[in-house]
Image: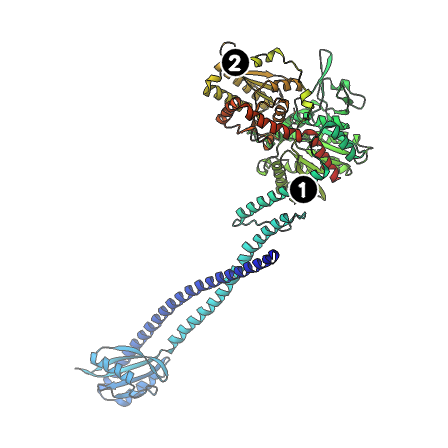
Amino acid sequence: MRYNSIPFVCRYTAKKTMKRIIGSILFVILVASLITVTFTVNQVNQEEKSLQTDLQYRSTLVADSLRESVEPNFINKSNTYLQNVVERFATKERFAGLAIYDNKTATVAASAAIPPNDKQITTIVSEVMDADKANGDFVTLPSGKVYIFALPLHDTKSVVGALMVAQNASYIDSRLFAIWRNNVIRLFTQAFLLSLAVLMVLQWVIYEPVRALVFSLKAVRNSSSEPSERKLPNNPFLRPLAVEVENVRRSLSEANVRAQVEARLRLEKLDTPWTAERLSEFVKDIVKGRKIYTISNREPYIHTKENGITQYHVPASGLATAIEPMMHACGGTWIAHGSGSGDREVVDAHDRIRVPPDDPKYTLRRVWLTEKEENGYYYGFANEGLWPLCHIAHTRPMFRKEDWEAYKAVNGKFAEVVLSEIKDVHRPILFIQDYHFALLPRMVKRARPDATIGLFWHIPWPNWESFSVCPYRKELLDGMLGSDLLGFHTQLHCNNFVDTVGKELESLIDWQQFAVVRGGHMTTVKPFPISIAFTDTSVAARGEGYTLGKEFDVMKSMPHVAIGVDRLDYTKGILERLQAIDLFLETYPAYRTKTLFVQIAAPSRTKIKQYKEFEHEVDAAVSRINKKYQSGSWQPILFSKRLHTHEEIDALYRESDVCLVTSLHDGMNLVAKEYIASHRDEKGVLILSQFAGASRELRDALIVNPYNIAEVSDAIREGFEMLQSDQTRRMRKMRSLVKEYNVYRWSAEFLRSMIKLS
Ligand code: F6P
């Protein structure tokens, strides 16, 4: 019954639509007819009037000129002469006849066509003589319609007769009929063409575009993997509707993809808990002996040499934090820029070193860059160009030609190293990291099509309008599309990327699969929200017995402690956070002397002017606020500007009641997740920027707009005053979420997706 009713509904709707279309056409015809009839009536009236006036005028002229020769002969009773005159004139064009009457309306002389004793004529003639005034009227004689014009004839004293001129008037009716006929023909032609135009407009402007929209939705509903052939309407009239349908279509596609992923995950048992051991087993199982290579700019261990002593440290890098556990668990080779002053000293003849230095698990292959290369590629193009371009944090991107050249050259250099590393390796798996290597996937793929290449973009991808300012956008996009799998933190960034490609490059977009096909090669684009190495045991162990240095003693005595942990980067919203702290202390003075804000800041990219200036601004803001509220030995902000170890930071997190993550824009932000993971006691409150990717997952944080200083200030108070039970409820949820989707699972999902594509 249900199935039968669908065609019925369609038929019913089609019938109704047809009726409406016919109705619209009839309406158009009706309007056109009314216009034509009105104009024709008007035209006919005017034409009739003008022809009649013309006829009357000519009749008067003729009669007047005849009178001069008729009148004397009438008085002299020269009837033969009069009959001659009458007959001579009667043969002229348009004359229907002439007649001369005496004062009793008896015919004195008449042309042959004038019927004798015609009542209509004699009435006009007698009225003219009675009134002694020329007059005329239209009458119908057996020969047709004529205009009768009569004028009185006089002797010296009185009216003695009348002269009558009859003019042919039937041509007036013919003329008026012709006007009607022409206009009716024009009306039919117009009605036909208008109906055709209406049908064509309906077809082109409405029917076809609407059908395209319907098909595109239908394709998604049926989970068709074929990209829709039909172009979505681009006419301004249907544009808003098309945009809406496109959004719905995209949401449906995303929902489909998510549902498929979830279904697959269930089947493949990618459920929790994920640990280093499980990842290691899983990878062994799926890679089946294939070798894994990670490529990034930042190396996981940096060796420095000071005063003759070589040491190493782990950099303040979300990327390194996330990839290291995977390399730990799976082994393989990590190719990265050797940036430390002591790096060259510790590598072997092939520029390799086994790491972690204290407990080697995988190989680090260092790539050396000259200062010039580093300045152009890393500081210049990557961090003064792409970084602000992708973050949209109101710092203008700089695109210098020489930086771009260096970027291309360094990508080429890394490509050479990668190719030499995988020279004898069959079907290697390459996991390329971040915006430093947009060109690398294409370079490697061209030389080694058998390599499976994944690129993970750790920073946001902006909307097309923002990205389009980059002069090298097409080359960058093409380079990225050399990868088989392209990962971003969020679905929004995937959408922005695919949208950008659609607008910039010749390619086929498959919205169902979220893939781009270019030059016969397919790149699948997917969200992989990165995470941290959080398991039941991992973070619990890290930094648990760590004793914080004297610098942080004051934290212990403060009833309220908030913390911020960032690289000194203008995207992190540190200045806005300081403004919020200022406002908080201003608005809630009771908190003064009882509150401490710890700001951990790792200096970053200090060669770049904007970063130097930013550091000065932060220094100045901290000094200003500390000065403003200082009371005795108490200062509100403890600013620790140096590199801190993970253990130290974990210990600091544990001492803090509130953690402030106020990025102006951030791909993910792992500080948010690490703060949660460090709180085994399920206490603490996370204040999180709505513009950090993490806010999509950690809904139990206090989500704020970092540009809204008052909102952040109030969130700080809410955080300090939150009931223990509320804190626990929120923390518990967020902890289980981060634990469930930890970095081991992230790595497993990314690798598994790559392998499925190869
Ligand atoms: O998000 C991009 C990223 O690579 C992060 O992973 C990391 O925290 C940061 O940039 C480090 O930058 P850099 O390697 O330039 O110090």
Quadrant for the N terminus in the image: bottom right
Percent x, y of residue 758: 76, 39
Write down the residue under mark 1. 260
Q: Nearer the viewer, residue 123 or 165?
A: 123
Res. 406 visible in picture = no
Rounded to the nearest angstrom, the CA distance separating label 1 from label 2 is: 54 Å
Q: Earlier in the sequence, mark 1 or mark 2?
A: 1
Q: Residue at x 42, y 71 (%)?
A: 180
Question: Where in the image, quadrant-wise, is ligand 1 located?
Answer: top right
Secondary structure of residue under mark 1: helix
At label 1, the amino acid type is Gln
Residue 362 visible in the snapshot: yes
Secondary structure of the residue carrying tag 2 is loop
Label 1–label 2 contact, CB within 8 A = no
- Count of all numbered marks drawn on residues in the image: 2
Q: Residue furthest bottom?
A: 80
Q: Position of residue 325 (x, y in %)?
A: 71, 26
Label 1: how many residues lie within 10 Å, few (<14), some (14-19) or many (20+)?
few
User: Where's residue 727, x and y in %?
Assistant: 56, 25
Q: Position of residue 111 (x, y in %)?
A: 32, 86
Give the labeled residue for mark 2.
635
> What colouring method underlies this structural image?
rainbow
Disc 1 residue lies near ligand 1 with CB under 8 A: no
Q: Nearer the viewer, residue 595 or 482?
A: 595
Find residue 53 and report its image quarter.
bottom left
**Other residues around mark 2 within 10 Å, as few (<14) / some (14–19) / many (≥20):** many
* Three-letter residue code for mark 2: Gln
Looking at this view, name the residue that lies furthest to the left: 157
Q: Quadrant of residue 741?
A: top right
Q: Is residue 45 above or below residue 540?
A: below
The reply, left or right, for residue 573 in relation to residue 227 is left
